[in-house]
Image (spheres, coloured by chain):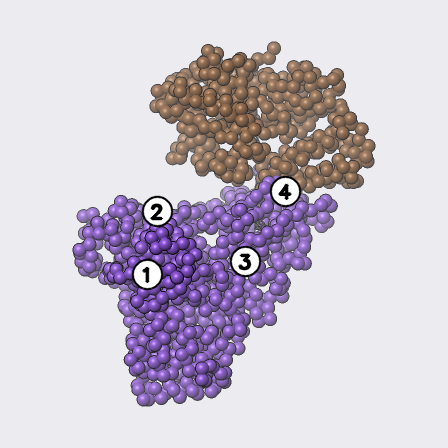
């Protein structure tokens, strides 16, 4: 059985009620943090735990917190990134809907650590239920004195507001998120300055993923060594994987970092209908595809990087032997093309171009040279865009061509024989 | 200023200021890096991605427009990888571009064409369907062609960084993104023309110039905009001796104006589109004499003979005092200098002036000599705009101030009688009752009078007299008169004391304001004893007002000239560019005055109203077509050039010929000879003794219910604008009152009314605005609404009544 940290109580009925949450050990970490630790000590603790950001890039959280300028005259903000827009990802939702107080407690502690008095949860617009759950949980926490003015008699004010996005994938990117939160059209901002220095309302701002923040109370409760003991040396703790696609039991699975893909697949009860595995996205649509040759790969930051892919958000999308890879890539390219914010030329024009070529190929109007064209467009996009979305759009293209070039050729020659077309 | 940073670009070392972007450092070495979204006048955004470079130690290519220089940085701008990716990016931009270059007005000066040619892909790989956007109208000056847009967002950023309201934005996402005005409204004319040159492609083009010529068929000459006192550098683009468009002169580093960035960056829409009058059929092109009720053309010789004959006759019969001349402050320094010389030295008459509004004081010039120049602005601790609608009186100066306050965080303090649209970027803005500036400034000085400051101030000559003139007036009275509370005044005065080296901007045509502002600056300097002094910067609607004041400092005679004319003593009057009927106070009287003069010579670009009274009319060269110089409000000498050749004689030549015919030697072959002589007058500086100047206090007469407040509008029509088709309908004359007054008088927006007083009446439309205070009526001088019908004094209160038609 897997070891659950974050989702330990997420299945408990009424866990979203503060009483149940407290009965299960909740709101012990916050008073401890406030009374036993100085803010800096919490940052050190998190650093020691080895916790890395769960939003996709895997940046060490403690280190990131340390970048918040100590002497800025401006207020500091904590922003929880609950935009969860990456195709295939639904792990943050499980936390929000299953154990909202865990996130709230984590945010209160994190606010204390970085010196913020105001925190925001930027939640994906479609998560209407999640937003409602959070709002009522925040109200409960406020009533119980865990949020609001003078939290638990510490003399500190810490409060949280929920802000619903309006449905743009790019608003998951932290700086676009800030623009959106400020009431503007969400588009990535120029870095530097980084949000830790000039973020929300031009003030120092820490942006963390839901899962990252939900780990914080556990680290306070059980200590950094305990946390660092789970997972692998460089990817500590657990990871919530959201498995979708051609498996028997799609869903949310929390396991220690470093579990092999094979085992993960087993947890999801294997490929549906007894078919064979063809390929999978290990961490969401923005991570390069891997194939059945990678069955034994360990699901952690370093191993996936070594294999030429990424852990990303932990969204595992499984494709069986019937899947047409050209169609898969075409579908994703269309997604990125539509979600490009339009700011920079390579992404805006390049994804549009890719999508047009894919559309042609899918309409059986592929031409000789289209594969090279797709690759050359992708190469011109990769590394030249303003934010990583443009790079991400090239991932399914380049990786699917790398492993499945033959399928492209078949397509262009009008001979695709995949049943899903 | 920042430290010096040394870096290496393409193997060559360069040293630049800290904070410089790599793209600028490269430019300094003469290394070209292509760019679209970058513009030196705008903040970097890094969105087009064409300016990529390789930097040692950074794995990813970097955009050089967003990359700050660092010591020891090693940059390569032309490696195979850079070339390849750059090609890729340009290829992306060309992918959906319509390539309709043959019919695009940007052709020849299009960055997409130029950079594609130099750095772009040789063959187009894009073989798909190109996207298209719907067209729509965004206003009379700028044409929008979204299919050509490369989304560099310079136009949007211009409005964000310089504009007042949000005007343009990006709509939709991804490849469907386009640039639109909000809610499909129109561009508000004002500064919209700047988007034309900012747009690197043909997506925003000049509607007036549309399809008129190709850029390579035109030539340009650099000159100065005659539209107001700012003195912006312009390029006059012509083909076949016809001006087709005006652009800012971005490359002009002439004289000493290169470092403050006011004069050669942007233009206002007035300055950019006010040239159509040049080819108007109503131009005076030959000398004419009055015959019966009309004018008939004559030769220059005949006209000159007549003028000389009448001039000599008047002098012989009634003495030199019986002749006089009035010139305009839109005339060049050379014209003004010679005009004065003609009357003073050659004829020996004291009757020569340019002041359309009577004012008399010898102090003004000394104040002007100590006034601020544009170059003081960047180093000033704050800018205090007092009682001028700067965005309309000197639009580009206003634009500059707004950008500095908005983007660079400099302190802007506003005191104004009505909202001017600068409030959003001001640190503090105060609204006072129109006409009470003297009280307000007195109130501010009262706020500063703690015991210590009082001692500093008492030492200044004239301070006690100054105070005495306000003797009876308490703080409460100041509050009541100005409508500004004591707390607000205290806030203003403590802000003033908080920063050193203010630039106090006021309407330089109002003498009492000039004195008040001078007093305030002096008070601040004496109390603060700081390193940087506060200075006054007067602003003017006329391009050469500062020059005219400098060249004709004498206590003025315009009033005497008019009096002499009225009493019949003046026999001969030479009007050069001046139209007393439309410019001088009390219009009705002016008609009578001119009728009384036996012989009037009017030299002007058009047959003005005053010219109707003339016996002889001489043609004047258009300001866009003559040589000469202005001294702009910022104290700099600005040189005019002939944008096109016009057949008539230059005014300065006419004056010299006249003098020669009178037997006075005034021989200059070219304008430069004359300039050297004039320079000695211009360079002479009066120094202003530290002295409080007396300020006149005016009382409301209380005869009519409304106090007239004069507004400003850059498009208000004068003889030039009324003949420029593109912009002549932007300004709609009218009277604006408060909603409560309108309700009281049963008036509604759009009602036809008569505004009247004892002097005369004007029929206009009424509008209401909640920013106008009750009891005030705001009107702007315009050809269809000449306010001198209602005014006989420039300062103090003019009262009117309004009746429904
Ligand atoms: C296009 C794009 C979309 C992203 N979407 C999300 C998202 O939905 N949720 C999220 O937590 N991080 C998202 N990120 C990553 C964030 O920018 C940011 O790195 C993250 O929220 C930091 O949190 P962490 O340090 O806790 O991982 C996205 C990044 C990009 C470039
Ligand atoms: S890469 Fe795409 S999403 Fe990111 S800034 Fe550029 S256009 Fe926008
Ligand atoms: S209209 Fe011109 S200036 Fe504006 S974004 Fe498009 S190309 Fe740039
Ligand atoms: S601000 Fe004045 S000088 Fe400058 S362009 Fe406008 S009218 Fe001409
Ligand atoms: S010029 Fe540098 S990114 Fe556009």
Q: Which residue is label 4 attached to?
A: B175
Q: Looking at the rendered structure, which numbered label has been put on residue B801? A: 1
Q: Nearer the viewer, residue A145 or B688?
A: A145
- The chain drawn in purple is B
Asked if both marks, 3 and 2, belong to the same chain, the answer given is yes
Percent from the top left, x then y, of residue A18? 45, 16
Q: Chain of mark 3?
A: B
Q: Disc 3 or disc 4, which is closer to the eye?
A: 3
Q: Secondary structure at mark 3?
A: loop
Q: Nearer the viewer, residue B796 or B405?
A: B796
Q: Secondary structure at mark 2?
A: strand
In the image, what residue occupies the spot 47% across and 77% down? B619
Asked if both marks, 1 and 4, belong to the same chain, the answer given is yes
Percent from the top left, x then y, of residue B40? 51, 51
Earlier in the chain: of badge 2 and badge 1, it is 2
Q: Nearer the viewer, residue B505 or B64?
A: B505
Q: Looking at the rendered structure, which numbered label has been put on residue B428? A: 2
């Amino acid at each position: 059985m897997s070891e659950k940290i974050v989702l330990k109580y997420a299945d408990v009925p009424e866990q979203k009620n503060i009483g149940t949450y407290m009965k299960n050990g909740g709101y012990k970490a916050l008073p401890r943090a406030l009374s036993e630790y100085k803010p800096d000590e919490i940052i050190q603790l998190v650093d020691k735990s080895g916790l890395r950001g769960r939003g996709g890039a895997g940046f060490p959280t403690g280190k990131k917190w340390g970048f918040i300028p100590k002497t800025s005259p401006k207020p500091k903000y904590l922003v929880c990134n609950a935009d969860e827009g990456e195709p295939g990802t639904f792990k943050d939702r499980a936390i929000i809907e299953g154990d909202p107080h865990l996130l709230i407690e984590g945010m209160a502690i994190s606010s204390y650590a970085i010196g913020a008095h105001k925190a925001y949860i930027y939640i994906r617009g479609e998560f209407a239920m999640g937003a409602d759950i959070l709002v009522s949980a925040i109200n409960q926490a406020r009533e119980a004195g865990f949020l609001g003015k003078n939290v638990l008699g510490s003399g500190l004010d810490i409060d949280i507001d929920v802000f619903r996005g309006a449905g743009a994938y790019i608003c998951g990117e932290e700086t676009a998120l800030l623009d959106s939160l400020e009431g503007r059209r969400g588009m990535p901002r120029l870095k530097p300055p980084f949000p830790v220095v000039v973020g929300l309302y031009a003030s120092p701002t820490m942006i963390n993923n839901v899962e990252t923040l939900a780990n914080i109370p556990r680290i306070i409760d059980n200590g950094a060594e305990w946390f660092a003991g789970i997972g692998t040396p460089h990817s500590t703790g657990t990871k919530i994987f959201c498995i979708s696609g051609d498996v028997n039991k799609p869903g949310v699975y929390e396991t220690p970092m470093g579990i092999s893909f094979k085992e993960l697949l087993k947890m999801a009860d294997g490929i549906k209908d007894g078919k064979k595995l063809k390929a999978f996205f290990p961490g969401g649509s923005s991570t390069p595809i891997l194939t059945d040759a990678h069955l034994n790969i360990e699901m952690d930051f370093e191993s996936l990087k070594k294999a030429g892919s990424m852990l990303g958000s932990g969204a595992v999308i499984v494709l069986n032997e019937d899947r047409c890879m050209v169609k898969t890539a075409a579908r994703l390219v269309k997604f990125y093309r539509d979600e490009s914010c339009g700011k920079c030329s390579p992404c805006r024009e390049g994804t549009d171009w890719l999508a047009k070529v894919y559309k042609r190929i899918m309409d059986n109007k592929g031409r000789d040279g289209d594969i090279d064209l797709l690759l050359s467009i992708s190469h011109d996009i990769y590394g030249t865009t303003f934010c990583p979305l443009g790079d991400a759009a090239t991932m399914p293209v380049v990786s699917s061509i790398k492993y499945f070039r033959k399928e492209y050729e078949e397509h262009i020659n009008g001979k695709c024989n995949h049943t899903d077309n | 200023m920042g430290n010096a940073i040394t870096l290496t670009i393409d193997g060559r070392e360069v040293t630049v200021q800290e904070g410089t972007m790599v793209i600028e450092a490269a430019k300094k070495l003469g290394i070209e890096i292509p760019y679209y979204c970058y513009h030196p006048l705008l903040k970097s955004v890094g969105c087009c991605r064409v300016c990529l470079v390789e930097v040692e130690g950074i794995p990813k290519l970097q955009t050089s427009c967003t990359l700050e220089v660092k010591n020891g940085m090693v940059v390569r701008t032309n490696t195979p990888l850079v070339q390849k990716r750059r090609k890729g990016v340009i290829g992306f931009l060309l992918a959906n571009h319509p390539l309709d270059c043959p019919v695009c007005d940007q052709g020849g000066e299009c960055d997409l064409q130029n950079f594609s040619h130099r750095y772009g892909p040789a063959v187009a790989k894009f073989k798909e369907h190109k996207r298209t956007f719907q067209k729509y109208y965004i206003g009379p000056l700028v044409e929008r062609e979204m299919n050509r847009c490369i989304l560099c967002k310079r136009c949007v950023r211009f409005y964000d960084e310089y504009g007042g309201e949000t005007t343009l934005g990006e709509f939709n996402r991804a490849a469907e993104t386009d640039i639109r005005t909000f809610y499909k409204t129109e561009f508000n004319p004002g500064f919209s023309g700047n988007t034309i040159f900012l747009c690197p492609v043909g997506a925003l083009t000049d509607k007036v110039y549309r399809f008129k010529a190709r850029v390579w068929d035109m030539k340009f000459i650099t000159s100065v905009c005659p539209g107001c006192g700012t003195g912006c550098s312009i390029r006059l683009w012509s083909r076949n001796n016809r001006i087709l468009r005006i652009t800012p002169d971005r490359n002009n580093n002439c004289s000493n104006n290169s470092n403050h960035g006011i004069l050669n960056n942007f233009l206002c829409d007035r300055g950019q589109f006010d040239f159509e009058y040049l080819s108007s059929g109503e131009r005076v092109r030959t000398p004419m004499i009055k015959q019966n009720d009309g004018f008939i053309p004559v030769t220059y010789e005949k006209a000159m003979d007549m003028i000389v004959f009448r001039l000599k006759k008047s002098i012989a019969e009634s003495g030199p005092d019986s002749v006089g001349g009035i010139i305009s402050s839109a005339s060049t320094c050379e014209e003004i200098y010679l005009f004065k010389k003609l009357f003073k030295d050659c004829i020996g008459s004291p009757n020569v002036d340019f002041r359309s509004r009577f004012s008399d004081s010898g102090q003004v010039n000394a104040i002007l000599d100590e006034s601020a120049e544009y170059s003081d602005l960047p180093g000033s601790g704050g800018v205090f705009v007092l009682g001028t609608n700067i965005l309309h009186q000197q639009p580009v100066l206003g634009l500059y101030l707004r950008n500095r306050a908005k983007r660079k965080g400099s302190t802007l303090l506003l005191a104004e009688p009505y909202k001017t649209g600068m409030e959003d970027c001001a640190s503090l803005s105060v609204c006072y009752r129109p006409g009470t500036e003297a009280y307000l400034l007195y109130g501010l000085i009262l706020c500063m009078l703690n015991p210590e400051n009082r001692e500093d101030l008492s030492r200044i000559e004239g301070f006690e007299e100054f105070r005495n003139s306000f003797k009876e007036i308490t703080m409460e009275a100041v509050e009541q008169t100005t409508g500004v509370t004591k707390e607000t005044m205290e806030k203003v005065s403590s802000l003033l004391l908080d920063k050193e080296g203010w630039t106090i901007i006021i309407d330089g045509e109002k003498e009492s304001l000039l004195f008040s502002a001078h007093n305030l600056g002096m008070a601040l300097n004496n109390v603060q004893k700081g390193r940087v002094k506060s200075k006054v910067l007067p602003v003017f609607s006329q391009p050469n007002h500062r020059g005219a004041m400098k060249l004709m400092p004498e206590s003025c005679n315009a009033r005497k000239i008019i009096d002499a004319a009225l009493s019949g003593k003046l026999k001969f009057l030479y009007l050069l560019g001046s139209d007393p009927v439309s410019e001088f106070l009390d219009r009705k009287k002016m008609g009578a005055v001119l009728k009384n003069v036996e012989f009037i010579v009017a030299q002007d670009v058009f047959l003005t109203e005053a010219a109707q009274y003339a016996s002889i009319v001489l043609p004047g060269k258009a300001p866009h077509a003559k040589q000469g110089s202005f001294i702009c409000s910022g104290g700099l000498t600005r040189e005019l050039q002939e944008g096109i050749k016009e057949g008539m004689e230059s005014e300065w030549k006419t004056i010299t010929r006249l003098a020669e015919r009178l037997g006075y030697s005034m021989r200059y072959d070219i304008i430069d000879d004359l300039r050297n002589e004039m320079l000695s007058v211009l360079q002479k500086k009066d120094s202003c003794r530290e002295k409080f100047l007396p300020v006149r206090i005016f009382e409301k007469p209380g005869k009519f219910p409304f106090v007239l407040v004069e507004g400003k509008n850059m498009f208000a029509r004068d003889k030039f604008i009324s003949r420029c088709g593109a912009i002549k309908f932007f300004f709609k004359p009218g009277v604006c009152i408060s909603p409560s007054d309108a309700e009281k008088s049963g008036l509604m927006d759009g009602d036809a009314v008569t505004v009247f007083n004892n002097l005369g009446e004007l029929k206009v439309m009424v509008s209401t605005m909640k920013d106008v205070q009750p009891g005030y009526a705001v009107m702007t001088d315009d050809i269809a609404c000449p306010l001198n019908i209602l005014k006989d004094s420039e300062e103090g209160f003019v009262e009117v009544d309004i009746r429904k038609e």
